[in-house]
Image (cartoon, rainbow, N blue to C red):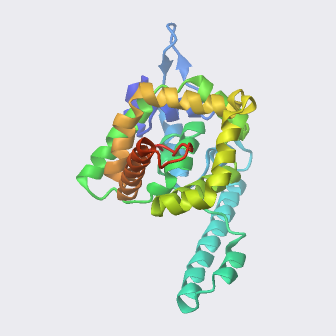
Amino acid sequence: MRMQEICRACGVTRKALDYYEAKGLIAPSRTENGYRNFTAADAARLDEIGVLRRCGLSVEEVRRVLTGGDRQAALRACIARQEREMRAMEEKRRALERLCAEYDVAREKALLSGLRETASEKLRLAFPGFFGEYLALHFGRFLDVPLDTDEKRDAWTDMLDWLDNARIPPEIEALTRQVYGEDGFPSSAFALEKQTHAAMEAMLADPAKYWAENAGAAEAWQAARRSEEYRNSPAARLEEALRAFQRQSGYCEVFLEDMKRISPAYRDWADRLSRADAAFAEAEKKGSANEIQMPCSRS
């Protein structure tokens, strides 16, 4: 089978196929002209991977199940990990019940501080590795929604097709690994994303109050970003590479528009950011805004 055939047969994306090969989970043969030739055994292995991923296993856990010496032990370790996560979810449910009975935020903050947050697995399943992790980091909170209408299902299909064909410059992954580490995004990156989102929510709720209370910190942040040290850093180069990719790839016109069709929460978020951008730009024209640059609608 050729790539398109096995993608259709096994319900995988091309990027997933490339990633699984790079990780050594599949090893298709090559024709004389360099094309990959997939066999029934490769299809069966992809079905195994698909089942295990849908059971909630990470790619590394899948590797241990498929290539380790003791498959049952590897599976039991996955079960134990899932049981820990389910216990954490149960504790969160009990925390909500306690809050309903007695709204003691300090108590619940202490009780919940050790629980690990889980993220949406939708994009991780379709795009394992760096790409899926990056998407989940920025969009996971918006994608905990059912694909329960034809419009959402069509948008999801369109979005996956665009993502599968988007050519991510190797520079972006290399810079991301410099910034976040070779093992992908650490839990601290997801915590920082949550903090950033919370700050943006506070700003959108009352921009004047937010800037009045945070002007000093914002000015210091802008000054740090203007420094030569930051401009020469991997983080700055990654930011510019991502902007260039977004401008050239149809990211705003395709991906973000599909996100709006899939997720009402994201559509509301993007609309509020757009209105805030417009209001800030108007304030700058009138001279009533300081030099602090407001974040543009992204995501």
Q: Quadrant of residue 3?
A: top left
The residue drawn where x is 63% and y is 49% is 218
Q: Residue 78: x and y, percent?
A: 66, 58
In this view, the residue farthest toward the bottom is 101
Q: Nearer the viewer, residue 164 or 178?
A: 178
Q: Is residue 184 above or below residue 214?
A: above
The residue drawn where x is 39% and y is 39% is 255
Q: Residue 275: x and y, percent?
A: 37, 51
Q: Is residue 113 above or below residue 10?
A: below
Q: Residue 158: x and y, percent?
A: 32, 39
Which part of the image, by quadrant, shows the N terminus? top left
In the picture provided, is 113 more to the left or to the right than 147?
right
Q: Residue 36: x and y, percent?
A: 50, 19
Q: Is residue 64 above or below residue 265?
A: above
Q: Quadrant of residue 236?
A: top right
Q: Is residue 58 above or below residue 168?
A: below
Q: Nearer the viewer, residue 291 or 264?
A: 291
Q: Nearer the viewer, residue 226 or 57?
A: 226
Is residue 198 visible to the viewer in this orientation of the structure?
A: no
The residue drawn where x is 48% and y is 63% is 206
